[in-house]
Amino acid sequence: MGQAARLVGVPSQTLRRWVVGSPEGKSALPTPASLIGGEATLDFADLVSALFIRSFREHGVSLQHIRVAALRAAKDLDHERPFSLRNFTTDGRRIFRWFDDTKGVLHDAGSGQQVIVPIFKPLLKKIRYGLGNQADRWYPLGEGKAVVIDPALSLGEPTVRGIPTRVLYGPVQGGASAAEVAQWYGLKKAEVLAACQFERQMHAQAA
């Protein structure tokens, strides 16, 4: 949970409340994340869902509204993690499911009304969708950047061309240059610098 919370950029307690629930309320997901030994275990769909929940919360959307929208979307799409699918965005205090990429028509997942809104969602630019419109990759530094989180690579660890970012950051932290580390692993210096940037951000969030 701690690693996932750092990736999402929120305290562990907050993430747990979002995906598992708390004595004060249910989770924002249609079905809570799995628990093993009392600890929440998040898969990639849970992680992407949490990223969207964070975005919604930053726009002032209440957890109750998020849950209502998620439940309705889960039923419509027959998917327990609708936020991990393409076609979601947010506008002010309403949550919409983006169902027409071309025309920019959005469906209000809370009331069923259709509206036209400007589509500018940085989060969507960082997520790649694969088969079934399911999120299958996240580029935390932005699309086109070296760092990727892919459940099919290194058990979902942040990587650069399959090499965990922590492995690349360690030698630099110990005094090696980015150019040296790049040579050791057959990478570009810019790729190592991206790994270091990501790891520093993660360490800063954990502090």
Image (cartoon, rainbow, N blue to C red):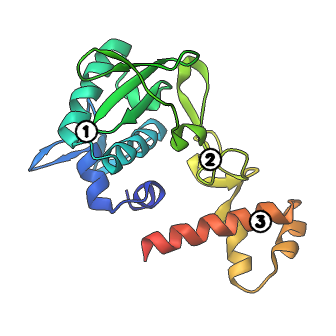
Residue at the image position 23 percent from the left and 50 percent from the top: 17
3D distance between C-alphas at marks 2 and 3: 15 Å
Question: What amino acid is found at the position of numbered circle 3 in the picture?
Answer: Val
Q: Residue at x 51, y 39 (%)?
A: 121
Residue 67 drawn above or below residue 205: above
Q: Nearer the viewer, residue 183 or 120?
A: 120
Q: Which amino acid does label 2 sit on?
A: Tyr
Dot 2, crowdedness within 10 Å: few (<14), some or many (≥20)? many
Q: In this view, does 167 lie to the left or right of 76?
A: right
Please name the residue shown 22% across and 42% down the image: 63
Which residue: 76% across, 50% down? Answer: 161
Please report whichever mark, 3 or 1, sits nearer to the chain's N-terminal start.
1
Q: Report helix, strand or loop for mark 3.
A: helix
Give the number of the disc on residue 75.
none
Q: Distance between the residues labelled 1 and 2?
A: 24 Å
In three-dimensional space, the C-alpha distance between marks 3 and 1, rounded to whole angstroms, equals 36 Å
Dots 1, 2 in contact, CB < 8 A = no
Q: What residue type is labelled 1?
A: Ala
- The residue to which callout 2 is attached is 139
Residue where numbered disc 1 is placed: 28
Mark 3, residue position: 192
Quadrant the N terminus occupies: bottom left
In contact (CB < 8 Å): disc 3 and disc 1: no
Give the x, y percent position of residue 31: 26, 31
State how many labels appear.
Answer: 3
Question: Residue 27, relative to residue 185: is it above or below?
Answer: above
SS label for mark 1? loop
Q: Which of 106 and 97 is in front in this view?
A: 106
Q: Where is residue 78 in the image (x, y as percent from the top left)?
A: 36, 14
**Residue 70's quadrant in the figure?**
top left
Q: What element carries label 2?
A: loop
Q: In this view, does 10 lie above or below 125?
A: below
